Image: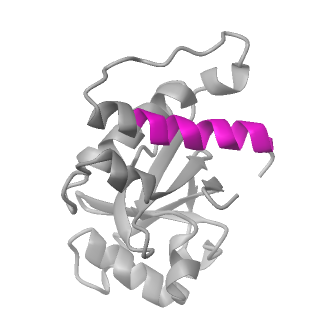
Amino acid sequence: MSEVYTAEQKKFLLELVRNTIKDKLEGISKYRKIDESTEWLNVKQSCFVTLHSSNGQLRGCIGNMMAFEPLYDNIIHNAINSAFRDPRFTPLRSVKEIDSIKIEISILTPMVKINSYKDIVLGKHGIYLTHGGDSSVFLPQVAPEQCWTLEETLTHLSMKAGLDPNAWKSPEAKFEVFEAIVIRDED
């Protein structure tokens, strides 16, 4: 991907997520101001914020596929949603808990329609599956982290959408792909 963030920018984004969640836990409703000269934060981009517990287990992951607001705002909204509104997990409850959470931010490129699932490159592409009125998404890092083949990835993606495990093989299945710049606490 062409967009690259400096170490200082990555650190700023990770701190933004952590501080946003801490502020919410402490009942502080301040909106952190940014310098207008930070153009890179004002570009309309979509992202996902993923939280992992200290043992590496998923603790929350919420994001947007389409860019509709500046990156700065999108990261703040998705940090709060990931920590407190992911229906798969109980909301974070204490500042101590956020101190042990590992943060991952995935900044997405626009989605591109592909003709066949065979055009998907695992580890490079995030995958958005639609089938009828159902849909699901995996970020590019999901398949490699799970050590899944393409077929296993698409089977899990179908099930995540609430579909039959083989729905991805149907002519009704449509795929779009995207890439992500991934920023982790370890970076």
* Residue segment shown in magenta: 5-20
Q: Nearer the viewer, residue 106 or 12?
A: 12
Along the line of sight, the residue nearer the viewer: 148 or 11: 11
Q: Report x, y in % for residue 93.
A: 23, 49
Q: Quadrant of residue 101?
A: bottom left
Q: How many marks?
A: 0
Task: Locate the C terminus and report the quarter of the image it occupies.
Answer: bottom right
Q: Examine the structure image and report whether residue 10 is included in the region drawn in magenta.
A: yes
Give the image location of residue 16, x and y in percent. 53, 35
Most frequent secondary structure within the magenta stretch: helix
| Residue 180 located within the stretch drawn in magenta | no
Left or right: 57 in relation to 73: left
Q: Position of residue 92 (x, y in %)?
A: 26, 51
State the image quarter where residue 80 is shown.
top left
Instruction: Residue 113: name its quadrant.
Output: bottom right
Residue 163, percent from left and from top: 22, 75
Residue toward you, 65 or 17? 17
Instruction: Look at the image and tell me whether residue 129 can be seen.
Output: no
At 54% across and 24% down in the image, what residue appears?
Answer: 70
Q: In this view, which residue lies farthest toward the top?
A: 36
Q: Tell me which residue sits at (42%, 58%) in the image.
A: 51
In this rendering, the answer to whether 24 lies above or below 119 is above
Residue at (39, 51) in percent of width and height: 98
Does residue 46 appear left or right of residue 78 in this picture? Answer: right
